[in-house]
Image (tube, rainbow, N blue to C red):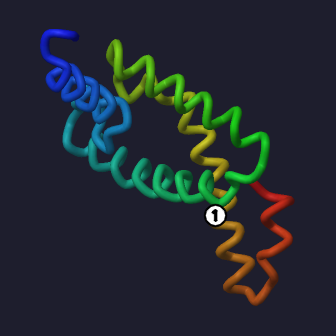
């Protein structure tokens, strides 16, 4: 690590990419990869938006710490996409909060009250 820090950082980024990739790691059949992509990308994207929208809530810090611990361990060791599955549940909850906010907004409701009641 001290001999080549740039290579160490590159490999850490590759490990993180493998852990958070939108393709299954280890690789699977094309159809399985496509289904995973179609289901994972929207959940991860909306989940990330939901986490950012809920960043003022104290409880989100604990969930953020779970993500941070996964990132730290993955950067040092290795991860498959299945190792991240316990984090996917949180992204699903945050994605649902974004969908609920959007639904309320488009139906003409007020979104302001949702910032304190919904993740």
Q: Nearer the viewer, residue 45 or 57?
A: 57
Image quadrant in which you'd find residue 63: top right
Which residue in the structure is indicated by mark 1?
98
Q: Residue at x 79, y 43 (%)?
A: 58
Element on which disc 1 rests: helix
56 vs 112, nearest the viewer = 56
List the single residue furthest toward the bottom.
Answer: 108
- Residue 99 x/y as whole percent: 63, 66
Q: Position of residue 57 (x, y in %)?
A: 77, 49
Compared with 30, 117 (above or below) is: below
| Residue 41 horizontal/vertical position (percent) | 40, 53
Write the residue at 29% across / 31% down: 18
Residue at position x 61%, y 51% in the image: 51
Image quarter in which the N terminus is found? top left
Query: What residue lies at 44% left-to-right and 17% top-to-bottom?
Result: 73
- Label 1: few (<14), some or many (≥20) within 10 Å? many
Q: With 71 as the anchor, is 75 left or right in this view?
A: left
Up-down: is 41 above or below 10?
Answer: below
Please name whichever residue, 70 or 102, is drawn nearer the observer in this view of the structure. Answer: 70
Query: Could you tell me residue 50's position as x and y percent?
Result: 61, 57
66 relative to 77 in the view: left or right: right
Looking at the rendering, which quadrant does residue 79 occupy?
Answer: top left
Is 44 on the left-hand or right-hand side of 29? right
Q: Is residue 86 above or below residue 34?
A: above
């Amino acid at each position: 690590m001290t001999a080549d820090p740039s290579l160490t950082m590159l490999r850490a980024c590759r490990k993180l990419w493998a852990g958070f990739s939108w393709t299954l790691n280890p690789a699977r059949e094309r159809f399985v990869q496509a289904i995973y992509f179609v289901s994972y990308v929207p959940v991860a994207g909306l989940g990330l938006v939901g986490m950012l929208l809920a960043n003022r809530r104290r409880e989100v810090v604990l969930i953020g710490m779970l993500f941070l611990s996964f990132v730290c361990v993955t950067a040092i060791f290795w991860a498959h996409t299945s190792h991240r599955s316990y984090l996917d549940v949180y992204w699903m909850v945050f994605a649902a909060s974004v969908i609920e906010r959007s639904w309320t907004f488009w139906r003409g409701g007020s979104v302001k009250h949702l910032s304190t009641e919904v993740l």
